[in-house]
Amino acid sequence: MSNWTHVAGIIRLDSFRIDMYPEPNFDKLFGKKLNYGNWEDARKHPEKYLPFGSEGSLDKSVWVNPEKSSIPAYTVSIFGDLRDHDSVKDIIEWFKEKCKFCNSDNTHVWVRQATITASNERYGTESWTYEEEA
């Protein structure tokens, strides 16, 4: 019988959207969607993909604030259902690392808010909320 992990996460990102900063590459920031059947590259380079199970990966959706002068520039939703992915801890750790990477010097985006919940049918639920380091 299958075991499913259900995920819902959101990250609000700040950015100065001026000519000197390029538009973020969200596939590089968070990973690409893995469709069913593209397993060879994903197994060799899992860091290039959103977390995945036996039938594909999580999804991501990006909202771009139409007001270019507004610092809260992007909202990224990470969501989906992973078949045969047992570890909610791995999902939470992946999300934390993505938040840390977004705050690094070379991305030109910064986390304003972020939260995620991962729920596994056998092993329970974990949630995490970003808190800015002092």
Image (cartoon, rainbow, N blue to C red):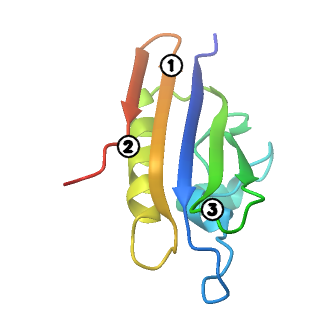
Looking at marks 2 and 1 on the same chain, the residue that comes earlier in the sequence is marked by 2
Name the secondary structure under disc 1. Answer: strand
Crowdedness of circle 2 by 10 Å Cα count: few (<14), some, many (20+)? few
Q: Position of residue 112 (x, y in %)?
A: 46, 51
User: Badge 1: few (under 14), some or many (20 or more) residues near its Cα, within 10 Å?
Assistant: many
User: At numbered mark 2, what does the secondary structure look like: helix, strand or loop?
Assistant: helix
Q: Which quadrant of the structure image shows residue 101? A: bottom left
Identity of the residue drawn at 54% across and 46% down: 11
Rounded to the nearest angstrom, the CA distance separating label 2 from label 1 is 14 Å
Residue at image position (61%, 49%) is 50
For the N terminus, the image quarter is top right
Label drawn at residue 119: 1
Whole-number angstrom distance, CA of label 3 to CA of label 2: 30 Å
Amino acid at circle 1 = Ser
Residue under label 2, please give it.
Answer: 93
Q: Amino acid at mark 3?
A: Ser
Kindly indicate the quadrant of the structure image that contains residue 17: bottom right
Above-or-below relation of 51 to 115: below
Q: Front-most of 83 and 69?
A: 69
From the image, state whether disc 3 or disc 1 is nearer to you: 3
> Dot 3: what SS?
loop
Crowd class of label 3 (few under 14; some 14 to 19; many from 20; radius 10 Å)? few
Residue identified by numbered label 3? 70
Kind of residue indicated by mark 2 = Glu
